[in-house]
Structure formats: C-alpha cells, structure tokens
Image (tube, rainbow, N blue to C red):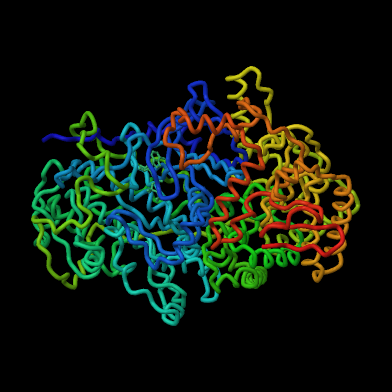
Amino acid sequence: MSLALPAQHIDADQTTEVEDQAYQEDVVVTREANLTRSHKNNKMINQYEFNKRLGKGQHGDVTLCTDAVTGKQVAIKAVKRKNPKVDRMSHFKKRPIPKTEHTPVTEQLGTTEHKILKEIAIMKKCRHPHVVRLLEVIDDRLYERIYMVMEYLGGGEVKWRTEQGDPIIRVSQTRRICRDIILGLDYLHHQGIIHRDIKPANLLWSKDRRVVKIADFGVSHFSYAQRLAALGEGAISPSAEDPILMDDSDLSKFAGTPMFLAPEILAEPPGDDAATNTSINLEELADDTVETVTLKQPRITKAIDIWAFGVTLYALLFGQLPFHGEQEFAIYSAIKECDWDVPEKMGIDEIEVGGRHQDKPKKGQETEGYLVVDLLDRLLQKDPRKRITLEEVKRHPWILRDLADPELWLRSTHIGNSSLAPTDDETSSALSAVRFRWSNRITRGLTTLIRNVRPQRSFRYVGRQDRGRRGERAPEDDVGTRSMPYVNLSRQKSISIGVHERDRHRQRSSAHPSSRPHQSSIDLNASWRHSSHHEETPKASGSALPSVSGSSSKPRRGSAPGHASSSSESPRLSRRAAPPHSPPPISQASSRSPQATSPTGSFSPETHLEDRSRSRLSMFYRWVTGSRQYSSGPSSHDTSTSTSPFEASSSTAMHPPLDHRASSARTVLARRSEDAFNKVSFRQSQSSSSSGPLTLAQRAASWGEVGNYSRPSEDMTSLYSGERPEEILDDDTLLVGAGGIAQSPVPSLPVSAVLSTVSSTASLGSPALNAAQALLQRVSEANQVIIPDASSRNRSHATSPLAQVGYSPTRGPPSPSQQPQYYEGYDEDDESDMSGNRTPSELDYADMQPSTSQMYEEEDEESDDEEGVPLEVRTRRPSVTVTDASSSPPRRSDCSYDGRTRPTIYV
Ligand SMILES: Nc1ncnc2c1ncn2[C@@H]1O[C@H](COP(=O)(O)OP(=O)(O)OP(=O)(O)O)[C@@H](O)[C@H]1O
C-alpha cells in the first residue's frame, strides 16, 4: 500500500509578508453579535457566514465560516458562556470518566465560563505559525454566547493510523510534523503556557498540508512561574511567597487525555498538607533558574507536554499507542509502571526499527530506528526531571536528520535570545465579566457583596483595550490567565486571597520593582518566521491524503477509528516492567543556552497605583461637578493597527491625550466585526441603513426595545464608567452581577440596586457615599416620570427592564434589520443545520415573534430548573426593575423598591 501525504515543505521565501502581517495583528474583541441570514439563507454572525460544521467540542460546535468582507474562511467555535448543569455536575464528579481513552478528562478546572475565558486568554497570547491563531472574539452578552473566530485549518486533524491499526504516514513526514510541534510547543512554553492535551487529534493540518499547528487550548494552563523562569536570569526570581506562583495550583488538577497523560499527573494527589509542603525545584520550570521554593502544587510542569509529544510521536510512527489497558485504571498503571516496546517496522514506508534496546552503534552509523528509539526513550522518561527538554529535542539527530542546514534551522528557530519587548499579551485578557471603576474600596465592597451572592461574577476581567484607554498597565488585573487567586471557581476557601493577597503583593511590588510580574515578554515574532523553512526538499511527494475508511467518522475527537476504547495489548508488543533507565546523553544534544535578558519597559507600579486611584476619584469629581471631559468622543487618530496598545500607554500612564487615543483604538478595534457586518448588510440589502457602529437606538433594537426609545442620560453611564465615547454605548462599564444595568436608560435604572449599592458603600467614606447618594437622587427623580402601564406590568412579571420601554410586540415576520435576534432560535444546540435551512418549528418560532417578555419568560422557566445555581436565574441580563407596591410579589432574584421602604434585594 502506498499511502503518502503531500510533503510538508516550505521555503523560507514562501512566508509572505501578508502572513507576517496576520501574525502581528491583535485579536479583536467585538461586543455585538448581529444575527442575520445571508442571501443563501445561511446563518450569519456579523460578517461571518456559517457554512458547515467542522466538529463538536465539549463546549460547543466548530463551524467553517466565510468572512463576507475578506472572503476568507475561518473556523468559529461557538460556546455558551455558562452551562450551569455541567458546572453543577462537576461538583459531584470526582473525576469525569472519559468515554474512551482519547476523550479528554478534566477535574474541577472551574466553571464553564472560566474554562472558556481561560482558553481565550491563552489563545490571545499566541501568535505563532504552529499554533492555531485566534482572530476575533465575539462576545454576545444577550445570549451569553462567545464566538471564537479562529484561522481555519483546512487539512483537518493529523491522522495516525488506519482502521487496522497500521501507521498512515511516512517516517519523514512524521519528522516534519514533529518539527512543527516542537516549535509550537517551544513557543508556548516560553509564553508560560502548558498545553496539557497534546495528541494527534489536536494537531491540525493547513489546507495545503504543509504546516501542522497546535490547536485546542481547552485545558491549557498559563504559569507565571514558568513564564518568568523562561525569561532567563535577568528576569524575576520568584520567592516562596510570591502569589504569582499560586497560579500553578491549577496544574494539580487532573486534565488531559488518558493515553497521553504523563505519569506525574497520575501520581496520587498529595493531601492538603503534602501539597502545601511540596518543595519543587524551579529547574523543572526552566533550566536556568535553580531556586528551590515551596509551592502549593505537585511536580507538574511543562514536561507533561513533552511526554504527550512522545506518545504522539510513537502513535504517528507505529499506528498504535505505547501504553494500553483494558480499563482506565489499567492504562494509568501501565503509564506509571510499565515500559513500552516497539514494533519491528515503523511508518507506512516500513522502516526497520531494530528493537527496543539496541547496542549503541559507532558515531555516524546510527540507524533511523536506533535514533527513533533513543528519542522515544528520552521523551517517555517517567521521571520528569530526567525527561528530555524541548531544546534537547530540537537538537536530537533524528529531528535534524533530513535538514539541509541543521545549524541554520536551530539558529533561526531559537527563541531564547529574542528581545524581551513587552507585548500586549502580557496584560491582555479575554473578555470583561465584571467591570467597575470606582475606588478600590467601593469596588472591594461590591465585589464582596457580589461574591457572596454569585460566585461566578467575581471573575474579574479587565480588557486590554480598556486598560489602554485608562492609560494603565495593571499587572494585577491580568486575572484572565490566572487560575486561582482571583477567580472563585468552586466556592473554595482559597478565593479569599483575591483582594488582600493581591493588594499586599502590589505593595511589595512597589517596594521591590524586581519582583514585578508582567513586565516583559518575549517578542518571538522574529524567531519563528523561518521556523519550518529549512528543510531539505522532500523525497517523493505524495499526491493526496490517503482516504482511510472510517477515519472521518470516529465517535469522538481523538478516538481512533475502529479502535475499541479498551483496546487490548498489541500482539506485536511484549510488555515488561520498566527497568530503571537513565540513558546516556546524546552527543549531539548540546547545552541549552537561553540568553539572560533583562525585562524592559517603563511601567512604574507607584505611578500606576497613584494614577489608578486618582482616575477613579476624579471620575466622581467629574460627575459631581458636571465635567464631561471623558465624553468628548474618540479622536480620529487611528491606532487600530498598533500591535500593542501599550505602546500608547506604557510610557505616560494616564496622560489624557493618550487616554483618548487608546479609547479610540479600542473603539475601532472592538467594532471591527460590527463595521464589517454593517458593510455586508449594506451590500446585501440596500435598504439597510446601518453603516457605522451601533447607535444606542440600534442597540436598543437589538435588545427588543423598538420604538419610543429615548436616550435620556449619558451621564449615568459616565458615572459608572468614568468615560464613554459619544456615539457608542459603552457596554463594558458596569456589569455588576445584575447583567449590565448601566446599559439601560435611566427610566429602567434599578433604583433598588442603586440603593443597595449606596447602603453597601455607606461604610466606605463620604466621597463615595455622597456620589452614590447623588446618583440615587438622580435616579429617583428620573423614575418619578415613569408610569408603567398595566399591560407592561402584566407582561413582564417585573423581571425585565425592557418591559418598561414601550415596544410593539410585532406579529409576523420581522425584517432582519429590525429584530435580528428574534429571527431564529439562536441556540447552538439547535443548529443542526448550519446551512440555514430552518425546520418548520423554527419557522413557526420566527413567525410567532415572541415578545421580549415572553422570550424572557421562556428563558426564565428554563432558568428555574437551575435551582442549584440560584444566581444564574436573573443576573445574566438586566433583571431589575421598578415596580409599584401593588404589583405581583417580587420573585426570587428581583430587586424591588416601593419608593418608601428600604430597598430589598431578593436573591
Ligand atoms: N481552527 C480550526 N480549523 C479547522 N478545524 C478546527 C479548528 N478548530 C477546531 N477544529 C475542529 O473542530 C472540532 C472540534 O474542535 P474543538 O477544539 O472544539 O474540539 P475538542 O477538542 O473536542 O473541544 P473541547 O476540548 O473543548 O472539548 C475538531 O474536530 C477540530 O478538528
């Protein structure tokens, strides 16, 4: 059988400037999702037309889409922000049992939302030709969906065996895939990212099958300790008490795919005491840091990716896996205790291996089989401290075997000596969940209040652009990639470290600039550009991907076709207990030499702190005095092409002009998808009038508020946010648990929420209290003019502020421009037909045109199932309203205020 993949061969020259440019671009965060239909009647989100489903992940589908503006294909992963049922179940499950040994398992890695945000945060950090690129994130807050727009890898997953369990690719092709993985992994590790789920199913071919990229960061982990250690000697030397190391506590969680799990993950988790006292050598994290510290974590490091890479290499070469077992337990004990063996032949070209243990040949006479086994031996070292490092893997003779100029390849792909220019990744975050910009004390008070009420909302994210707008670099705000200190995952005690530890650390940082986290990062762009371009011209290049029957219909991603989940041991292998093995060093494996480089950047913690509090206090002052400095709208200066917003903000924090510039940049960036959508809408329908960013009225329409919409107060938003452009409602301003009350016009402002805010901040000092009381006064005045009509009361059950806004419950099919969100079910679970052919029931639904209240009622009923997570019920959208005393009794999560008595929050 002559199966051969097209050779993966790229010339250095083939890396075009366009591609380089693509990797320089920022990930765009778009906060509007306009749902329409294309002229082919396919579903569209903004400018992206959905074509066909590529696959289904744990949290949602991945769909092939076309960018109607550029015509490019992208892959969009649509996920729900929250999945209370899954989250609730995860509390009860000690360890989710996977369906097959290829199904990833996770253990208490946080809520669905946390996992998604973490995946996004990690992907946002990655710009590398061997890592799948995240292009845009569309945050649809109305339906609590997140759309991750990624580059499309048209070649699909790397297949590794036929139905019969034979290898499917040639050895030389395996080597090229390995080189790509090594470079991608090397980059990730230098970024502080441990992938944790390396396996063939997470390696995607480009459409031309020249490049393999690492995908799926669903269980990946970001480690500050690793990142700092990777920066070299000039970087920070983490101390034992440094809270940044707390991040690595997440590593102790059980995550990955069973057959690819490293032995150290499978070791018995230490008890609390043991975990606390576990002493690890940071040499495990980076080779040039040797400080021994005490950490709350088991010995799990980036070495787990190297192990998984070893299993992947084995799979690609032999079409089978090195460790087997009838059951999960047997697999795990094999991984921990058994040695592996090798078949006689490897690759589809059936190259002789020569056995598991071979005599060492003379130098220069090593066979391919000998070198492969030697490399596998080092990769599959059960002791992570003895396991080969990536730098050594890169220099292994089997990896370099067919390169025309190995030294050139090594030099051009070395990332240790890259400059340490700060990147936006250092301080980027995924999406905003809670945004509040009053003084620290008020924020803390509210955070505590909200945390008690709803743990999920305590996840605090501050967008990069917003930070840029404030002119700040806020290291401590980068909680997007942190796992424990700031995120209440499962109501654990450890969350209490969130505020106090952080503040303490901030003070320490001020006192000791050397211990500042987040200051620098590696600009790796230069080093990887030629990463895979120095290969020799391959030998016979295959023509097409072999068609392997059954390979496309596996039950679960990663599952081997035709391979039973509890596969028995291969007849070609014998198994014996693993001998204590300490292989001699390979002569060619040269020393690693990461260059010590000092972090750069002009960020000053003192300035930062001072400016931060000043901005918050001055915000109150501006509001009280009626100053509108922040409302002057974005400047026309276009910084959207800046690769790093901090270029504008790092040097002169909080300088007003830069504030505006950053604000402008954010506006432009955040609206790119909308603008594109509007362009498409214009093209598709000349009647479409939208040609720019959504106005407040348009936004209201998207919420169902059609007609009689007024724009009564921008000041209120200004009060919350401290700044907002003129034209665009800043939807990032205040989402304190109640789902965005600042987005509502004044008449629907939740008085009781404000009152409760006042009462909760009463102890925080007079400026805050005065401002809050002034707000209350203003809101009370505004609400006096509101006379809710009976129909709206009846309709709303007083749960939706939208009920107070006059709108026509139109019957009959609406135009997409009127109410795009109603136009279809908008539920990924229902999106069985991505081409847009709606089922009769969907048509019925669209034709029925439920009112906003009805829609909410339906969703409320849905929410009522979720009693175990009470705060899921109301807080995901504006759910507070003003009712009169005679209206129906308040429901569980309503806020009501009768104008006389004290406000009460029902939760
Ligand atoms: N950028 C992409 N280009 C092409 N196909 C993709 C892309 N990203 C994912 N896919 C495909 O979509 C399918 C689902 O991807 P996803 O990452 O969600 O799967 P998963 O690993 O099972 O997810 P999860 O780990 O969240 O459960 C996979 O089969 C994958 O091959």
In the image, taking residue 485 as reference, residue 272 lies left or right, namely left
Residue 890 sits above or below residue 659 on the image: below
Q: Quadrant of ligand 1?
A: top left
- Looking at the rendered structure, the number of numbered marks drawn on it comes to 0
Q: Is residue 437 above or below residue 807?
A: below
Q: Position of residue 510 (x, y in %)?
A: 67, 68
Extreme top residue here? Answer: 686
Question: Can I make out residue 422 in this image?
Answer: no
Which part of the image, by quadrant, shows the C terminus? bottom right
Front residue of 881/667: it is: 881
Q: Residue 311's quadrant in the figure?
A: bottom left
Between 86 and 619, the one nearer to me in the picture? 86
* Position of residue 540 in the picture relative to residue 273 (left or right): left
**Does residue 797 appear anywhere in the picture?**
yes
Q: Nearer the viewer, residue 846 or 297?
A: 846
Which quadrant does the N terminus fall into? Answer: top left
Question: Residue 546's spot in the image, x, y percent?
Answer: 21, 34
Residue drawn at x 59%, y 63% as measured from the top left: 455
